[in-house]
Image (cartoon, grey):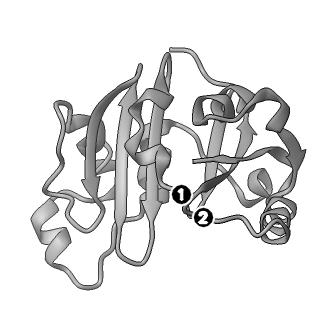
Amino acid sequence: METATPDEALRRCGADKDAISTATWWELRSRAEFEEVDQHETHVVAAFALGPHALLVEDLGDEGVYRSDLSAGTLAVSSFRSGNSEDFSVSRDGMALAWMYLSCLSAIEGDHPDEITNAFAAMSIDEVRAFEDDPEKHPNDLELFRRIGGVSPAVADVARPARMAIMAS
């Protein structure tokens, strides 16, 4: 399975080659604020290099969770959290394999739920229903991301400059 470079990942999101630049996340957010970017019409994305992999971070965006085509030729593991949504998905070679709401681990959809469930035991989630019923337990989407994607980003990985783009949605 191939990997996508940060520039390739941004182009898959719709960025023109000329719209891609290098900056820190803070600089990108400051630029988006200065330009008064409309979050409903504009997509603000950073692509951090993690070895041979690219980690896409969207500002108020959820394309990574809903666009399996971004995984063409590679594996994509996506997580999105907002005030009213907490989605997680796995896609490979442009095909959605499995997806779920993080609040409902027992209701994984897609033809390959094992792409997600295989990681549960390693996360000490042996009995999914019991885990969901325990008010003290919450799914850790970053740990699930790490287990499935095989990538463990650290704070330093996302604090350094990355490839960035602001583009029309």
Q: Which label belongs to residue 39? A: 2
Residue 103 in the image, given as x and y percentages of width and height: 26, 68
Callout 2 amino acid: Gln
Q: Which numbered disc covers residue 95?
A: none
Q: Quadrant of residue 86?
A: bottom left
Q: Position of residue 141 (x, y in %)?
A: 43, 59
Count of labels in the image: 2
Q: Which mark is residue 61?
A: 1
Q: Are marks 2 and 1 in contact (CB under 8 Å)?
A: yes
Q: Is residue 60 left or right of residue 81?
A: right
Q: Kindly state the secondary structure of the residue where label 1 is placed.
A: loop
Q: Nearer the viewer, residue 109 or 106?
A: 109
Q: Residue at x 36, y 52 (%)?
A: 88
Which quadrant holds residue 81? bottom left
Looking at the picture, how far across and down is residue 168, in whole percent? 64, 47
- Locate residue 163 relative to residue 150 in the image: left or right: right
Q: Amino acid at mark 1?
A: Gly
- Ranked by sequence position, the earlier of labels 2 and 1 is 2
Secondary structure beneath dot 2 equals loop
Q: What residue appears at the point 22 percent right and 36 percent down from the top-left corner?
A: 114
